Amino acid sequence: MSVKHHLLLVDDDSAFATALCEQFELHDELSVEVVNTAKNACAAVETGRYDLIILDIELPDHDGRDFCRSLRAGGMNIPIIILSELSSEADMILGLDAGANDYMVKPFKFGVLLARIRVQLRHLNQTARGAISLGHYLLRPNLKLLETPNGDKLRLTEKETEILLYLSRMPSSA
């Protein structure tokens, strides 16, 4: 049984979101939650656990790039893929500079989006196996170790490691 990855789709076009979700339902390794505003996305990110965010730029209450920038400023390090009808080079650069990991222009081929999602999830999983800085501590998930500032190494259980990985993906509180 494979790991199920949780995606957050932020798009105000309900017909598009529904069609995209129908495509995702064909792939057992992915589950998708849809929200239609940056405000709802902010609440979902605070309360839920997502492995990747798919983000539109043109949201009714906020520019998606500004939302992406605010997530990054808050310490959110999960992958973000922007899907937008804005197709100019400048739009793409601004989206990537705002902190997005990837940028795709609508319309797009679903297979290409799926492949790009899988690339981002692989990268996330590889990062999770390396060392992750948690304040003054260093988490080494693959070894199930937490290194303290003075060099002590604390052996962690699988559950403790999962909890710390989960917390490392959450935005830091201000």
Image: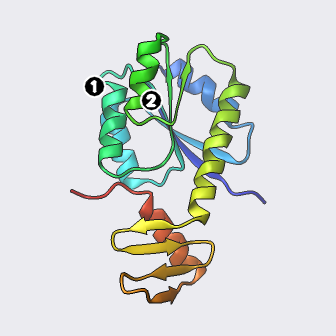
Please tell me in which quadrant of the rendered image residue 99 appears: top left
Type of amino acid at the residue the image marks with label 1: Asp
* Up-down relation of residue 32 to residue 132 (above or below): above
Type of amino acid at the residue the image marks with label 2: Leu
- Which numbered disc covers residue 96? 2
* Up-down relation of residue 80 to residue 45 (above or below): above
* Up-down relation of residue 157 to residue 92 (above or below): below
Q: What residue does disc 1 label? A: 61
Percent coordinates x, y for residue 136 in the rendering: 34, 74
Neighbours of disc 2 within 10 Å: few (<14), some (14-19), many (20+): some
Q: Residue reaching furthest top?
A: 88
Percent coordinates x, y for residue 33 in the rendering: 52, 41
* Up-down relation of residue 46 to residue 102 (above or below): below
Residue at (34, 43) in percent of width and height: 71
Disc 1 is placed on an element classified as loop
> Upstream in the sequence, badge 1 or badge 2?
1
Image quadrant holding the C terminus, namely bottom left
- Nearest the viewer among 89 and 171 is 89
Residue at (60, 43) in percent of width and height: 120
Image quadrant holding the N terminus, namely bottom right
Q: Nearer the viewer, mark 1 or mark 2?
A: 2
Q: Are marks 1 and 2 in contact (CB under 8 Å)?
A: no
Model colouring: rainbow
Q: Is residue 113 rendered to the left or right of residue 174? A: right
